[in-house]
Image (cartoon, grey):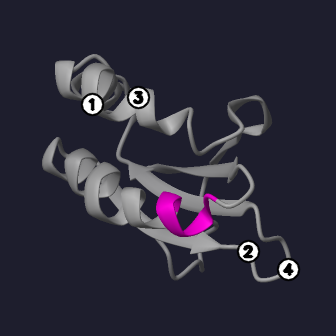
Amino acid sequence: MFFELRQYRILPGQRAAWVKFMEEVIIPFQVSKGMVVVGSFVGQEEDDLYVWIRRFESEEERVALYQAVYESDYWKNEIAPKVGQMLDRSRTVITRLEATPKSVIR
């Protein structure tokens, strides 16, 4: 099992719209395809920071879920075009993490 920590930078004035879009569209869609979203966060000291965490049981599961989500017509036609209007994609940081033995987020 591993986690994916995704850090995004939101374009000026788009934070509320981005959080609403994530919580009402992106996360529900990804969960409907089988993704496990562990958490969703905004920065307290950085107004442009949005972070979320997803969990995968294996690399094979991650590949299959990426395909189900990102290669779907809904993602390509409805979601992806809106993402670029709210995020600075060039500043996205994705980190793969493995929980330590005593982590409560296993």
Query: Which label belongs to residue 36?
Result: none
Work out whether mark 2 precedes mark 1 in sequence or the reverse, and give the earlier one: 2
Q: Amino acid at mark 4?
A: Glu
Residue denoted by label 3: 80
Q: Residue at x 54, y 60 (%)?
A: 52
Q: Secondary structure at mark 3?
A: helix
* Foreground disc of the pair 3, 2: 3
> Pointer 3 and pointer 2: residues touching (CB < 8 Å)?
no
Query: Which label belongs to residue 45?
Result: 4
Q: State how far apart marks 3 and 2 are (Cα).
A: 23 Å
Residue 69 shown left or right of residue 59 in the figure: left
Residue denoted by label 1: 78
Residue denoted by label 2: 43
Closer to the camera in the image, 3 or 70: 70
Q: Is residue 15 magenta?
A: yes
> Pointer 3 and pointer 1: residues touching (CB < 8 Å)?
yes
Q: Is residue 64 visible?
A: no
Residue 35 shown left or right of residue 87 in the figure: left
Q: Residue at x 75, y 55 (%)?
A: 12
Q: State how far apart marks 4 and 3 are (Cα).
A: 28 Å
Q: Amino acid at mark 3?
A: Ala
Q: Is residue 47 above or below residue 48?
A: below
Q: Which contiguous range is marked in magenta?
A: 14-18
Residue found at the far front of this picture: 13
Q: Residue at x 34, y 24 (%)?
A: 70
